[in-house]
């Protein structure tokens, strides 16, 4: 349950790599409950890396984990538990070969950091113009 609790975002991303690597090397099925945008985004990135042939433009390819993993949309699953006004729902969301998800998660879960960064950019641009 929530292994990312109290971890710095960088270490949350590394934890996603470590768990996936452990599942491959030890032939384990790992089920984790997370609330970490950083872990999901790192898994998306790893799937995209596996689906591309040109890694020259990537900043963070220092980790040997990238070279050891055969991560793909076929061996990674995401189940999104959420509620609507009446029911609790469990929805399977697939990782696509390019790292996208087959369905976007809601803004309450994903995109908070992106949304804040975009808002800051707009505020700074507006203040610069004034």
Image (spheres, rainbow, N blue to C red):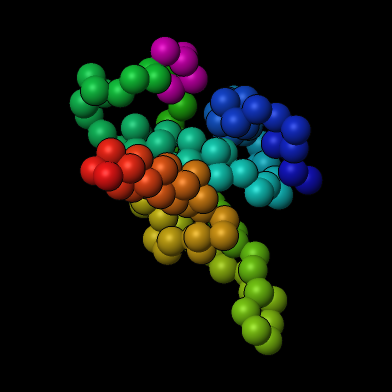
Residue depicted at 75% across the width and 37% down the height: 5
Q: Residue furthest bottom?
A: 86
Q: Residue furthest front?
A: 130
Q: Position of residue 53 (x, y in %)?
A: 22, 29
Residue depicted at 56% across the width and 31% down the height: 13
Majority secondary structure of the magenta segment?
loop
User: Can see residue 108?
Assistant: yes
- Image quarter where the C terminus lies is top left
Quadrant of residue 48 within the rendered picture? top left
User: Can see residue 76?
Assistant: no
- Image quarter where the N terminus lies is top right
Numbered range of the magenta stretch: 62-66
Please tell me whether residue 128 belongs to the stretch shown in magenta.
no
Quadrant of residue 2 within the rendered picture? top right
Q: Please tell me whether residue 59 is drawn above or below residue 80 in the rendered image.
A: above
Q: Position of residue 82 (x, y in %)?
A: 64, 68
Q: Position of residue 116 (x, y in %)?
A: 47, 47
Residue depicted at 30% across the width and 23% down the height: 58
In-front residue for pair 113/109 = 113
In-front residue for pair 129/123 = 129
Q: Position of residue 75 (x, y in %)?
A: 49, 45
Q: Please tell me whether residue 62 is drawn above or below residue 87 in the rendered image.
A: above
Q: How many marks?
A: 0
């Amino acid at each position: 349950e929530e292994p990312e609790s109290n971890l710095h975002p960088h270490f949350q991303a590394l934890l996603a790599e470590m768990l996936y690597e452990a599942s491959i090397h030890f032939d384990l099925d790992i089920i984790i409950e997370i609330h970490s945008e950083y872990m999901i985004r790192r898994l998306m990135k790893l799937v995209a890396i596996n689906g591309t042939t040109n890694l020259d433009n990537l900043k963070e390819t220092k980790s040997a984990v990238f070279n050891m993993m055969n991560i793909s949309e076929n061996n990674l699953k995401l189940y999104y538990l959420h509620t609507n006004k009446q029911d609790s729902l469990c929805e399977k969301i697939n990782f696509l070969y390019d790292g996208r998800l087959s369905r976007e998660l809601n803004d309450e879960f994903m995109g908070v950091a992106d949304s804040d960064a975009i808002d800051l950019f707009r505020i700074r641009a507006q203040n610069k113009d004034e």
